Amino acid sequence: MAEILLKVAGLHAWYGESHILHGVDFQVGRGELVTLLGRNGVGKTTTLRSIMGIVEKRTGSIAFAGRETVGQPSDTIARQGLAYCPEERGIFSSLNVEENLLLPPVVKPGGMSVDEIYRLFPNLLERRRSQGTKLSGGEQQMLAIGRILRTGANLLLLDEPTEGLAPVIVQRIGDIISELKDRGFTILLVEQNFHFAARVADRHYVMEDGKVVDMIAAAEVEQNRAKLQAYLGV
């Protein structure tokens, strides 16, 4: 595997009294695209939120580029080069497309320019003066991803980017995510659609009951098809 960019070990997380993660362990190499798979409610989104420091309480270790981040506030974590694209997308209804793109601060050098983002997402260029929430679901997802590409982050945390989208848009989002990987981004992807995940990922971590229970490499998916069906119900 490539140089380890993100290493999560013994991660526990809580919302109030609810203990959601129970010792999560996994790692992501620089330049990899890795998925977190599992049924609803097993802790996938909480894992992403914990990495960004936006849960009420977390313990264990999350090392990014060799630096421990547990105990750091979320803005400090983001400045190190991590960006989170939530499932709900977080598009600001009072802002147009371009204003939404320009809203997040640049946290480190190397981010994509607005022109580069428009080349990657030509739909957004056509709709740049439209209110963010007047876009289609697929265009909103493109805007949510495009917005974090300006920040300079080199680790992208993407939560359910294909949720509720038509198959043709899912295909386009897959093409975009593959292109981002080719450009050198490291991507941690939470995804319910295994057929989509299998197309783009290098490795899959499977979660159950708040912890990682298995790791399956892309080359081993076919021989583990029955096991994945049992895990995911697909």
Image: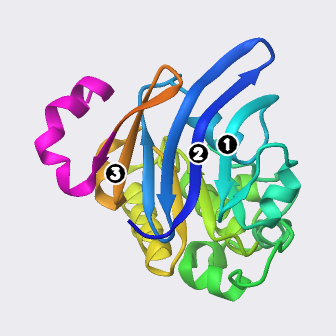
What's the residue at 86%, 61% (across, down)? 95
State the residue in front, 202 or 95.
Answer: 202
First of labels 2, 1 by sequence position: 2
First of labels 3, 1 by sequence position: 1
Q: Magenta stretch: give its range.
A: 215-234
Instruction: Tell me which corner region of the image, top left, top right, bottom left or bottom right, holds residue 97.
Output: bottom right
**Which quarter of the rendering shows the C terminus?**
top left
Q: Which residue is mark 3?
A: 196
Give the crowd class for mark 3: few <14, some 14-19, many >=20 residues within 10 Å.
some
Q: As displayed, is residue 209 above or below residue 166?
A: above
Evaluate if marks 2 and 1 touch, with contact meaning CB atoms under 8 Å apart: yes
Q: Main secondary structure of the magenta part?
A: helix
What's the residue at 13%, 46% (across, down)? 222
Q: Which residue is mark 2?
A: 8
- Give the amino acid type for the residue marked by disc 1 in the picture: Ser
Evaluate if marks 3 and 1 touch, with contact meaning CB atoms under 8 Å apart: no
How far across and down, in percent of the image, does residue 196 sit? 34, 51
Q: CA distance from mark 2 to mark 1?
A: 6 Å
Circle 1 — which element?
Answer: strand
Q: CA distance from mark 2 to mark 3?
A: 24 Å
Q: Is residue 218 left or right of residue 190?
A: left
What's the residue at 34%, 60% (across, down)? 202
State the residue in front, 215 or 111.
Answer: 215
What's the residue at 77%, 44% (across, down)? 70
Q: Is residue 54 left or right of residue 198?
A: right
- Give the amino acid type for the residue marked by disc 3 in the picture: Phe
**Which quarter of the rendering shows the N terminus?**
bottom left
Question: What label sits on residue 61 in the rendered view?
Answer: 1
Q: CA distance from mark 3 to mark 1?
A: 30 Å
Q: As displayed, is residue 150 above or below residue 58?
A: below
